[in-house]
Structure formats: C-alpha cells, structure tokens
Image (cartoon, grey):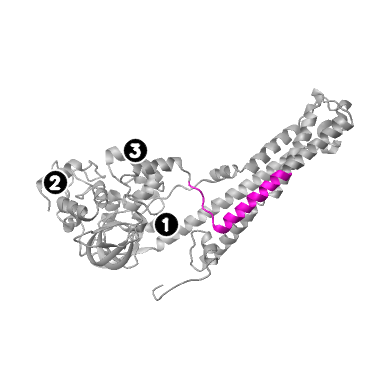
Amino acid sequence: MSTTATMGEMANSAVEFYPKGTRGRGGGGGRADGSLAGGDFGVTVKELRELMELRGSEALQKIQDGYGDTEGLCQRLQSNTTDGLSGDPADLERRRQTFGCNFIPPKKPKTFLELVWEALQDVTLIILEAAAIISLGLSFYQPPGKESELCGDVSGGAEDEGEADTGWIEGAAILLSVVCVVLVTAFNDWSKEKQFRGLQSRIEQEQKFTVVRKGNVIQIPVADMVVGDMAQVKYGDLLPADGILVQGNDLKIDESSLTGESDHVRKSVDKDPMLLSGTHVMEGSGRMLVTAVGVNSQTGIIFTLLGAGEMEEEGKEKKGKQADGAVENNQNKAKKQDGGVAMEMQPLKSAEGGEVEDREKKKTSVPKKEKSVLQGKLTKLAVQIGKAGLVMSAITVIILVLYFVINTFVVKGHVWLPECTPIYIQYFVKFFIIGVTVLVVAVPEGLPLAVTISLAYSVKKMMKDNNLVRHLDACETMGNATAICSDKTG
C-alpha cells in the first residue's frame, strides 16, 4: 500500500465531505485525523477525477504513489479484481450517493409557453399582430366628423353602413389566425420534443453492459453501473464510464470522439491503462475497474462544459465549497441518460486549458439549427419568393394609396381636414392589411415544412421496424446515396 508521507498528502488534498450516517464510522480510507475521505471509501470523487485526467506514465506514477498499484485502488473502492462487487443493493446505493449515478441529466425541456413565445418571434406574425390591433382599435373609434360631407364619400372609413358596423371582424379574424398558427407551431415542436425524449429513454433502457458481480458475469443496464464495478470490455463496445484497465489482451481504443485523433490507441496495464467513457473498443478485450461515472466522467465533464449539464453545474457551484466534488442530490430525480450520447460529440482537444474559453464561447455564440441539403435549398427558394412577394405587396399598397389620394383630393377636390384624419387613417390601415395579406400568401413557408412532415412520417414508419432515426435528415441522406461500397467486414 502507500507510505505515511503519501497518506499525509492525501489527507491535505482530501475534501471534508461526510455522507449521511458515515461521520465517525470505521472503514477503509481513514485519514490521520480519524475522519473519512469519500464516505466509507479511501478515495474521493475529486481524486478520481484528477486521476482520470492523466495519461500514460503520469497516470501510472499517480496510481503507484497514491495507491501502490491498481489492486490497491481496487481495495480502496472495496472491490475485487476477480469477483467484482458483491451486488448488495445497500452497497450499490451507497456508491451512487458517494460517487454519483451513471447518467448525464439532460437539459430541462422547453415549456409550452416558451415554445409559444418562440413562435411569436416570426416577423410576418409580428406585422400581422400590429395591423390587427390597429384595425381593431380603429373599428371601435367613431370620429366626430363622420356625418360631415367635407370628408367625402369615405366617411366612417367604410363604403357602406353595414361594413362600418362589422369593421371589427377583420381585426379579430387576423388575431384569431395568428393565435391558431402560433398554437399549432408550438404544439408541433412540443410533441416532437416529447417524442424524441421518449425514444431516447427507450434506447437507454435497452442498452446493457457486461460486468462481474459476486464472481458471476452478468449484463446490467448501463445506467446501473457504479464506481467499483469490474466491467468486461470487448471489440465493438462503447465505454459507458471511465475506468482503469486491470487486465487486457491486445486492446486498442478509438479516442477520436474526445481527442479528434483517428489513430487507435493501444492500452495496456503497464503502459497506458486509462479507459475513457465515450470511446470505442476497436480491437482486443479486457477488464476494467470503473472509477468515474455520469457527470464525473470525462464525457460528463465535457458535456457540462458544452452546456448539456447546465443544471448540474449550477448545483456544483452552490455546494462546491462544502462538498468538493460531491454528487448533486437532484441527480436521482433526473431522467437517465447513458454514455451512448457520446457518439454525437464533436472532436475536442484537452479541456484543461480551454475551460474558460469554452465557457466564454458558450455565452457569446448561439448554436444554429442545422438543415439538410434539400431543406436548405427549399428555404433559399422560399426566401427568394418571399422577397418577390414583399416587392409586390409594397407595390400593391402604393397603388392603393395613390389611387385613394388622387381620387379623393384631386378628382373630387376634397381638402384634408383634421377631423377627417381618423377616417383616412382607417383606409390606410386597410390598404396596409391588404399588402400584408399579399405578402403572407406569396411566402411559401410551408415548402420546407412539407419536407419536414414527410421525413417525420418516414421516421415514424421506421420506428415500427425498431429503426430509430434521431435526425430527420438521415432519411434524405440515405435517399441521396447512389452507390454503397462494402467489403467482407462491412
């Protein structure tokens, strides 16, 4: 095991955090002052996170200095390299309380009201709302000069008495149309979000990993893995947690999801035993000791920096000073999300020196929604048609205004009087609404939407065949494939 000096260094760096019911109890991991590090265990979450940030000889030296060897770390975690954990429910729960659960809580979904507010940001809808409010307000306004013949035959802002009495219907109809469009758009977004979260949950429940418990090789859901588990890794596996290799057979790992390097990294017990979540096993097999799960794993840390674990980051800042590295209590209530999400991560370099820069970028840059090739072309076409529609609507408004002005003030010879101003404004608002109507009809906003609906229909049909498509444009991509090249191994 470790020397007295090493234990002293650990005591200085350890955090004084005591899970409920563990203060003053005996057990492994005792420090010089009699208190405990990491509950009943001889290592804390912070120490394990710092250990997993090291690579190669540095990691081996850290393990040797702090724990003697991998077997010593395994004893600190009260596990066994041969038989694994005992599988006792109380022990598993204690590990989850101390080291965390193996899931990354997703961002809180947008509420229906937030989606409604987003739908209201459409420029066309804003113009319609303004026009409807003005029209509705003027329809109830009775100018004092309504009966005056000085305003001409446009008195009251209407051609006849019947239209004057029902002038409010136009503004109310526009408002009702805007409400319907906003509610339908928000409901579609909300239902799509709910559907994909349900699909994600379904995938997570089906994903399992092989571990050793009580000496038996069993498969358990990825979310049930805990620190101290002895996991068996083999070709094709996506590692769901961080760990240290305790036995390996020509093991090669693809770490491109974390480092961006496409070359496979050879792992061995005596050279580089560090295995990271989100990486793929490309060759060989082995057995690893799980040392970090969930938000404490390297994938979880990166997702937190990218904003995927925003709630957890806030919880850490509040409790960091008194519980350095302790797991947040609200994780147990969050929806389970396993390490499989790491497949969609963009290549990243080491986060040690870029943490501040990443946070600054997160604050200043707003991610844009990606569109497929077809959707991009249709959107461009819709914008071009919309610009033409804008020109035509402007010409329509100008012609109506000029016709009204020439007919009223030139042909009929009326004079603009202050008492007639509200009457004339009603006509100008009506002309503006006609122009907006031309614009709304001209803009083919349903063109890109039609593609989305058809792709969503295709995705729904494939779901019945147990084929999950997370991105709608994947169907379009496969449809554009003209040749598929394959050899014996695929």
- Asked if residue 168 shows in the view, the reply is no
Image vertical order of residue 206 relative to residue 133, above or below = below
- Residue 286: give x, y in percent of width and height: 25, 66
- Viewer-side label of 2, 1: 1
Q: Which mark is residue 213?
A: none
Q: Which residues are magenta?
A: 367-392
Q: Quadrant of the C terminus?
A: bottom left
- Residue 348: give x, y in percent of width and height: 36, 52
Give the residue furthest to the bottom.
488
Q: Earlier in the sequence, mark 2 or mark 1?
A: 2
Asked if the stretch drawn in magenta spans residue 221, the answer is: no
Q: Are marks 2 and 3 in contact (CB under 8 Å)?
A: no
Residue drawn at (27%, 38%), measured in percent from left and top? 322
Q: Which residue is mark 1?
A: 344
In the image, taking residue 141 as reference, residue 6 lies left or right, namely left
Type of amino acid under label 3? Lys
Q: Which residue is mark 2?
A: 7
In the image, taking residue 206 as reference, residue 420 lies left or right, namely right
- Residue 231: give x, y in percent of width and height: 27, 62
Type of amino acid under label 2? Met
